[in-house]
Structures are given as structure tokens and as C-alpha cells.
Amino acid sequence: MQDILDVLKTRRSIRKYKEDPVPEELIDRVIEAGLCAPTGMNRQETIILKITDPETVRTLGIINGKRMGKDEFDAFYGAPAVLAVLSAKDSPTALFDGCSVISNMLNEAASLGLGGCWIHRGKEQFETEEGAAILKKAGIDPDQYEGVDNVIIGYIDGEMPAPHPVKDGRVFRIE
Ligand SMILES: Cc1cc2nc3c(=O)[nH]c(=O)nc-3n(C[C@H](O)[C@H](O)[C@H](O)COP(=O)(O)O)c2cc1C
């Protein structure tokens, strides 16, 4: 049996990236991990928008940054690729399924030695006119799908930060 606990324990959020693009086959492995994530009743209604075109990655990063109230702030930290996760609006487990997909992708990125970070405001970024235009360009209907959140990936510029200490007192039991 394979144990992924070491990957889970050492994964950290990365916020500084080299410009180097990530090879397609690595990005696709990350996506594959997302696609096999558990979803409510195995509906698999979550989709992934892979963006590697530098201009579009930056445009969406800036749109996202604006939703934080920061002008001209790239909320994707210069990462060369973003995997935006969206769920069918009418799915009763849309948010949960999206988070499940995002977690799988983040952990797979870490296991491949890539840097990654979960980036919020995935819903709001696509509610803008500019954001919806990006969806339409990819053939995604903004009336049918809503953003959940994003995974940015790339090569780490600098050192991998040390693992976080895990807070005590978060497990309760009845035996
Ligand atoms: C729901 C969620 C939203 C997050 N949104 C952002 C974000 O918008 N920007 C960011 O830099 N990090 C974001 N993060 C990353 C967290 O800040 C990070 O996971 C947390 O500080 C723990 O650090 P670690 O991932 O290095 O262990 C998000 C994480 C989660 C789970």
C-alpha cells in the first residue's frame, strides 16, 4: 500500500515562482489527480480550466486581485499556470466537489515537486465581464458553471518552506 502522508505533511503554499513553464505532462498529471477526486454521488460535474497562456494567467490573476480590493495585484503570484475549478451551478455538492478536486491537485503538484497554492475568489473572478469572457473563450457556459477556486502551479523560486506545526486539540473522540 502506498502512503501519501509524507507528501501531505510537507506540502506548503508557494507564493514565488520561476517564469519557466511547467511541462504539459506534469500539468496533466495534476489535472488527472483532480479528475479522480471523490464527488457527491460520483456526479463528476466539476470541471477544470487549464490556463497556461501567460497573458491570460496574468489577466485572471489581476481580475482576482481586484476582487481582493487590490488594483494591479497579481493574486496568482506570477505562477506560469492556473487550474481554475468550476462546478455545475445546479449541483447540490458543487462547492464540496470543487474543494475535493482542488485538494487532490494541490497534493499531486506537491508530490511531483512543483510549487502550488490554493487561490480563493474563484467564483467572483468569473462573475466579472472579463472573467466570463475567459470562460466563453474556453467553451464554458458561465450560466451553467460557477467558479469554486483555483490552483496555481509552477517551479518554486527559492526554498520550500518548512512544514507548519499542526495545532493540538483538534481531535475529539468517543470510544
Ligand atoms: C479555502 C482556501 C483559500 C485560500 N486562498 C488563498 C488565497 O487566495 N491566496 C493565498 O495566497 N493563499 C490562499 N490559501 C492558502 C492558505 O493561506 C494556506 O493553505 C494556509 O496558510 C496554510 O499554509 P500551507 O498551505 O503552506 O500549509 C487558501 C487556502 C484555502 C484552503
Image (cartoon, rainbow, N blue to C red):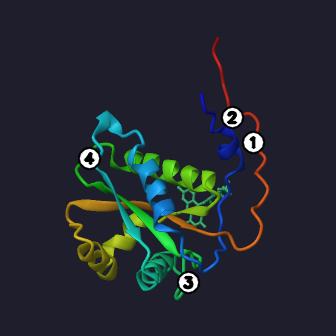
Q: Which residue is mark 2?
A: 170
Q: CA distance from mark 2 to mark 3?
A: 35 Å
Q: Report the disc number at residue 91.
A: 4
Look at the numbered discs 2 and 1 and tell me whether their residues touch, using CB distance below 8 Å.
yes
Q: Earlier in the sequence, mark 1 or mark 3?
A: 3
* SS class, disc 3: loop
- Badge 3 amino acid: Phe
Q: Residue at x 74, y 33 (%)?
A: 169
Q: Earlier in the sequence, mark 2 or mark 3?
A: 3
Q: Which residue is mark 1?
A: 167
Q: Position of residue 65 (x, y in %)?
A: 51, 78
Look at the numbered discs 4 and 1 and tell me whether their residues touch, using CB distance below 8 Å.
no
Q: Position of residue 171 (x, y in %)?
A: 67, 29
- Badge 2 amino acid: Arg
**Image height of 172 relative to 49, above or below:** above
- Badge 1 amino acid: Lys
